[in-house]
Structure formats: C-alpha cells, structure tokens
Amino acid sequence: MKNNSGKRIGIFGFGCVGQGLHDVLQDNTHLEVVKICVRDKEKLRTLPSNRFTYDPQELLQDETIDLFAELISDPEEAFFIVRQALKAGKIIVSANKKMVSENLPELVELQKQYGGTLLYEAAVCGSIPILRTLEAYYGNEQLQEVSGILNGSSNYILTKLDAEGLSYDDALQQAQELGFAEADPTLDVGGYDAMHKISLIAAHAFGALPAPSDILRAGIQHIAKRDVSLAQALGARIRLVASAKLDIKHKLLVQVLPTFVFPESELYYVEAEFNGVQLKAKYAGDQFLKGRGAGSHPTGSAVWADISAALAGYKYTYQKLDRAAVQLEEDAALKLYLRTSKPTLLPELAWLELTSFGVDAQAEQLVGTIKRKDLLQHLQALEAADAFVAEIPTYVTVEELVKASVPLLEEISGY
Ligand SMILES: NC(=O)C1=CN([C@@H]2O[C@H](COP(=O)(O)OP(=O)(O)OC[C@H]3O[C@@H](n4cnc5c(N)ncnc54)[C@H](OP(=O)(O)O)[C@@H]3O)[C@@H](O)[C@H]2O)C=CC1
Ligand SMILES: N[C@@H](CC=O)C(=O)O
C-alpha cells in the first residue's frame, strides 16, 4: 500500500473487522500496513501470504511501527497485545469490548504510566461515535441516562423473528454468516456483549466501573414465538435494551434486559444490525444516535476514525472516572414479563406482586414487580429454568396482557 504520511501500522486480526479496516484503508492510503498478524496458517486468505505473520512479536517488537490495530477475537491474547503495546508507549486501537471492559482500570493506568494511547470506539455500537460523544462533548455535562440497543446480532435476530417470522436458529445463523456475531454467539444472545458495552458507557458517561455481578443481565436465547406474538398483539416489539441511568437519589442503575418497546420510543424503529443510543443530558436534553452496530465496513470505519484521531493526538481523558464515586442502585423495582416451560425450576422470587396470565401444558406466562437486587440474585436459576424475561412498561395492565394472550394460547408452536 502507498504511504503518504510516513506512518506505519501493524494489524492484529483479519476477520470481519480486520478485513473491513483493510478495505477502508484502500481508500485512505495514508498508512502503510506493515503486516497482519493472524492465527490460522491453513486458512485461505484474500491477500498474498507474505502480508501475514503468525507471530505477534514480529509486529510488537518492530520499532518502525507507529501504531497498532487490535482486531482479534481472543480477549486474553488481545489483552496481552494491548498491554505490551501500551508498555512501549505506543498507540493502539481495539474493537474488543470484552477485553477492554474487563481490564479498564489497568488499561487507564498503563496509559498514564507509559504515555501511550488506547482508543476503542469500534468496541461500542460499531459505527456510532458514542464514546467520542460522551468523552469530548459530554465530558463536563451531567448525564442522566444513556441507554439503547447495543448489540447488532440480537437485534438482527429479534427483527427477523418479528418481521419475517424466521426461526430463532435460522436468524442466528444469518447473523453469524453476515459476520455480526461474536466467535462465541452466546456473548451476543446471552446479553454479555451488550453488558460489556454498557459497562464502557457507564465508565465514560458516569465515571462508574460496575462489576458484571452488579449488572442485571438477561439475554434473548430463550425467546419463543409466544413472546414475539404477545408483543405484536400489544402493539410492541421486543428489543434487547441496555441502560445506565441515574435515579432521583443519584444512584446508578445498570442493566441489560429484553424489553417491550412501543412505537413512542425511538428504539422501536431500530431494526436488523442497527444500534440506537438515547442520551439524556442535564442541559442539552435528549439526543438519539442510530447507525450500524456491527459488520465489516461500518466497524472498519470506526477503527479508521480512531486511528486518525489517535495520530492527531486525541486521547480519552476519563474525566468522569477521575471525579466520580458512583453508587449502584439495587432497591428500585421493575415490572417484568416472564415465561418458562419449566415452572417447577423457578426459584422462589421475592415478587412485590405477581399475576399468572397464560398457563397451558407447555408454559406459564407471568407478570410481576420485583426489586432489582432480588432478581439479580436469581438470574442463574432463571436461566436454568429456560425462562425468558423481559421488562415491560408499568403502564401495561394485566387486563391488556390477558386480552392479548388469550387468542395466542390456541396457536402455540415454539421456535
Ligand atoms: N464483527 C463485528 O461486527 C464486530 C466485531 N467487533 C470486535 O472485533 C473483534 C474481531 O471481531 P471479528 O472480526 O468479527 O472476528 P472474526 O472471528 O471474524 O476474526 C477474528 C480474527 O482474529 C484472529 N485471531 C483470533 N485469535 C487470534 C490469536 N490468538 N492471535 C492472532 N490472531 C487471532 C483470527 O485469525 P484467523 O484469521 O487466523 O482465524 C481472525 O483473523 C472482536 O473483539 C469483536 O468483538 C467489534 C465490533 C463489531
Ligand atoms: N457481535 C457484536 C459485534 C459488534 O459489536 C454485535 O452483534 O453487536
């Protein structure tokens, strides 16, 4: 590749995102790609074999390289690469939300200590410039809420179930074939990927570092046709929504839950692999950002934006992280829809109120109100009972649920 600026880049990973970045760089010939480090020597590649190395040290120890892009699917190896680059005071950009969210304090410290730069916009919502917006624009304004659809694969699956009546397995397979899903798709459908992303958002927006065990998380892997049909009958759609919001006592509530979303919400219109993020700021008011949350070129574009910014001297300031002592909210109650085909495995949940409205030989549907901390304690048991849980707005009444569910009970066939 032609080199217009004299800057040299080493790339780790040549999968969906690595190839996307490589394509983007063809139109932006400001950088010379020194080599690309991959793992599998047998894999067929779209570039000549001399463009690749299988030894990360060949790139990491090359003094002539100015910056790195870490775009591999192995979080442990990714951490090793990023740590070594930062210890050498280099610039490195990453798309690996699991690795960054699980190691953020150390990564921040390494940047302070050795003067290197780590940017990771591509790790959160693909092409949407959410971290830069939180850092550069809202670095000093108090935010009240950042929430939205942060995982492209699960949104793609939910859209296909709802709009096309596709089966769950077929929709997941499509998301994998299109390159949206993680190497282990449990991360997507189990809500873990969205959890990693909302953790990073919580750090940049609120200065909070919630532990995974503090985040109320459930995924879409147990969704059935009955749930989708119920949402349709209510005039809603089910979406996997992640949120970080301050309550009136200034405690932060962080969660990832399937949610019944109605047409009044911008999130209702976020389809397929798109993501949408709504921000509520003290003075600026409400904003909404929407864009492709996964995929080769959209994510490659975000990586390129980070590379350009880092070369121009941009760094995250982590202003709120330095200032904040954020307490997490546990006592707030939420209204929950729950369906399970194994009701006997349900734990004794401490419901504040509970109504069973759809029971037959195959499953039981319930709606109730419960405190966050009580639900948090039982997430594993709910998972064991193959329960599908979703937050439902408080204004949806039991009468509406009964009315919507009765005709559906007759035409049940699970996915
Ligand atoms: N796909 C997407 O839309 C998005 C992905 N991301 C993130 O980007 C990263 C890459 O994802 P994606 O491109 O989809 O993943 P892929 O599975 O498509 O590609 C992964 C790449 O990583 C390489 N790799 C894996 N382990 C190692 C290792 N130990 N050493 C060297 N290379 C290794 C693989 O090598 P080989 O080719 O030899 O198998 C492959 O080239 C992940 O962190 C993901 O979460 C972020 C935003 C969007
Ligand atoms: N697997 C992720 C990829 C982007 O972060 C997703 O589906 O959103």
Image (cartoon, grey):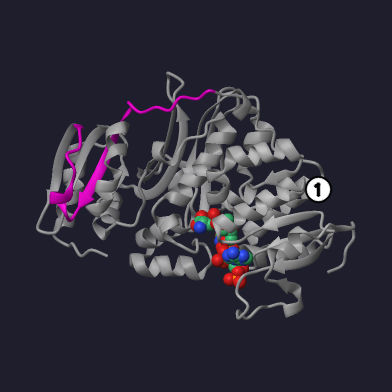
Q: Assess mark 1: CB under 8 A from ligand 1?
A: no
Quarter location, residue 284? top right
Q: Residue at x 64, y 45 (%)?
A: 129
Q: Residue at x 60, y 52 (%)?
A: 79
Say above or below: 46 vs 179. Answer: below
Residue at image mark 1: 311
Q: Is residue 330 magenta?
A: yes
Residue farthest to the left, as pictured? 361
User: In the rendering, at what x and y percent does residue 149 appear?
Assistant: 47, 47
Is residue 347 something that shows in the picture? yes
User: In the rendering, at what x and y percent does residue 132 appear?
Assistant: 66, 40
User: In the rendering, at what x and y percent does residue 97 appear?
Assistant: 55, 50
Q: Residue at x 77, y 39 (%)?
A: 115
- Residue 26 lies left or right of residue 205; in this view the side is right
User: In the rendering, at what x and y percent does residue 122 appear?
Assistant: 62, 51
Quarter location, residue 323? top right
Q: Residue at x 43, y 20 (%)?
A: 248
Assign the N terminus to one quadrant of the image.
bottom right
What crowding class fits label 1: few (fewer than 14 Cα within 10 Å), some (14-19), or many (20 or more)? some
Tell me the element at label 1: helix
**Residue closest to the eye, 47 or 43:** 43
Magenta region = 325-351
Amino acid type at circle 1 is Leu
